[in-house]
Amino acid sequence: MDSTSALLEIDDISLSFGGIQALKNVSFEVHSGELFSIIGPNGAGKTSMLNCISGRYHPQLGGIHFRGDEITHLKPNQRCHLGIGRTFQNLALFNHMSVLDNIMVGRHHLLKNNFLTGGLYWLTGARREELEHRRHVEEIIDFLEITHIRKAQAGTLSYGLRKRVELARAVALKPDLILLDEPMAGMNHEEKEDMARYIIDLNEEWGMTVVMIEHDMGVVMDLSHRVMVLDFGKLIAYGLPDEILANELVKKAYLGEEDDALDEEATSGEVA
Amino acid sequence: MSLGSSMRPCGDFRTSYASDTTIFATPVTRYLVIALIIGLLFVPLIGNPYLLNLMIQIGYYGIAALGLNLVVGFTGQISLGHSAFFGFGAFASAWLNNSLGVPVFFAIPLAGCLTMLVGLLVGIPAGRIKGLYLAIATLASQFIFEDFFARADWFTGGSSGAMAEYLTVFGFSFDTDQTYFYIVLFYVVLMFTFTSNLIRSRDGRALVAVRDHYLSAEIMGINLTWYRIMSFGLSALYAGIGGALFGHYLGFVSTEGFTIILSIQFLAMIIIGGLGSIYGTLLGTIFMVLLPELMEWGVHLTSGVFPDIVQSLAYIKEMAIGLAIILFLIFEPEGLAHSWKRIKAYWKLYPFSY
């Protein structure tokens, strides 16, 4: 894979909800094989950006291209066939299913059996197919070290484990581009270290391009190849981590240098 | 129960994914269920007609209730028009046999398929609306069908109803309770096995995913509209087969039997049995079929003390259903399936509580 080719191109998109402009003329590119971070204050439009890429929202203006194909108006369920997977900021597991079944749902678009062949299980090859995919799922379970909870009901798990199961489910989609919405929110130091390792492994060993939203600056600056900063729906900086750290605008809007910058942040929290 | 632990007996290790993906939790459970089914084969030889009648009722209601559980329990939608599908299946099978000359043997599954098509049609609103709105839409379909049954003379025989022939295979007629029992048993085993397989394969998981978190289900590549509509189609398939079995058992299908009351009874079966539980559906159906019988028994027992009570029997039966639903919603909202799990845990863990 050519490391400089653009896997995802965001071309001047704008998204608004009534009078609220969540995204204003944002453009950027994510290269194949990259670990790309989006940062910004709360309500800056980071999750809206991810929702546009995953298809939850459709921007009113501009276009989104994945591997050169226009995907701006595709439904979310059509995008996973192309190789886009994601996790959610607020846990979105199937709470009454086992961890194993949750991850098996991730294989949905790769499985071929339907209600008829699934119902006839032994006669139609559905059994063989299910077991084959179970093998792939077990590899993911092994990688994310959740073997001990594979039969547990997802809703009964602790927060950190649920986050990990959600990552497992997104990995099961076999995506080329994985979108992670605050994968480390609410975790303790040790869990964060584990999660950082998983993300690096996904990127380097599994060959996935990662787009991540994260608030922990240490993690973002250490992990990311490139960083984009949003503030009030506008792209204010875009580049290498070191450049971002040195950027005056970013310091003012997010990283914090002056006290009035903090006041501004406190009043901007409507757009999630 | 701690994380990841199971009720599996110690020493029961799984060495292949196939042995870890079975319908029954343990081999012992599987053998017990198979033994139970074999045991049921002998019931017609020794059982009395009353018992057989009850078991046949449990059979066809159970199949229909399982369909409703697919749409309500597994997919998390609401349907108040299930008895319309049940009735449609009964009329469709009779019509296929009477008007088109399809043998009853084939008419029963065909009626199921016809009802499924109707269910897919009725399910179309479900692709767009949810909750209370969907409840009203399905309620409307219930009344539309009731009216249709009463007016469509060509299909249902109108107010005079439709005759349904007995099932005949190679000249052998299943016209007694003893013989018809085997037909119903066959369909019960078939439909419950089919559902168990469905739930552990791709589309079954997709249905549950739609129920638990539809937004992330969509991100996982599940087409919400299609699965919502499909769950209605599937539920109608089950109701249609249940209805057809009902029709050919009674020999006559009346237009008045498929009212909202029956729909509520189907809902009661799955609420009492356990939403989203396959064997719970059967437990709930057994409960709902036996409840009026129990009431009757109780009334006759007390009629020596209260002679007037016999006249109120019909009301007592109705009230008992309502009371049972309320009590279950308060004390055991997860149904008999959950009670059964607790009983099992009690025996397994005795003398400790966890």
Image (tube, rainbow, N blue to C red):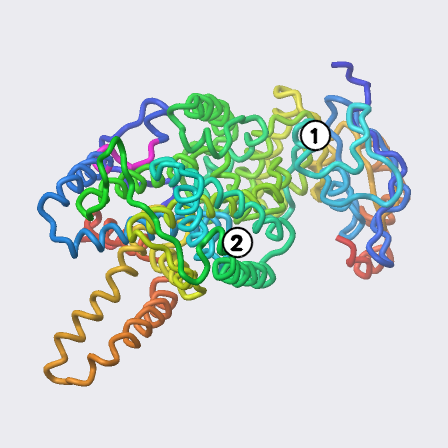
Q: Residue furthest top?
A: A1
Q: Which of A28 and B221 is in front in this view?
A: B221
Tag 1, which secondary structure?
A: strand
Above or below, B327 relative to A186: below
Residue B256 pos. (x, y %): 41, 64
Q: Within 10 angstroms of label 1, few (less than 14), some, or many (20 or more) residues? A: many
What is the number of the mark on residue A210?
A: 1
Above or below, A170 relative to A203: below
State the image quarter where residue B140 is shown.
bottom right
Q: Could you tell me which residue is drawn at 34 percent across and 49 percent down?
A: B164
The chain ID associated with circle 2 is: B
Q: Are the residues under marks 2 and 1 on the same chain?
A: no
Residue A39 pos. (x, y %): 77, 42
Report the magenta residues as a range. B22-29
Q: Is B61 on the left-hand or right-hand side of A21?
A: left
Q: Name the residue under label 2.
A: B77
Q: Can residue A217 be seen in this view?
A: no
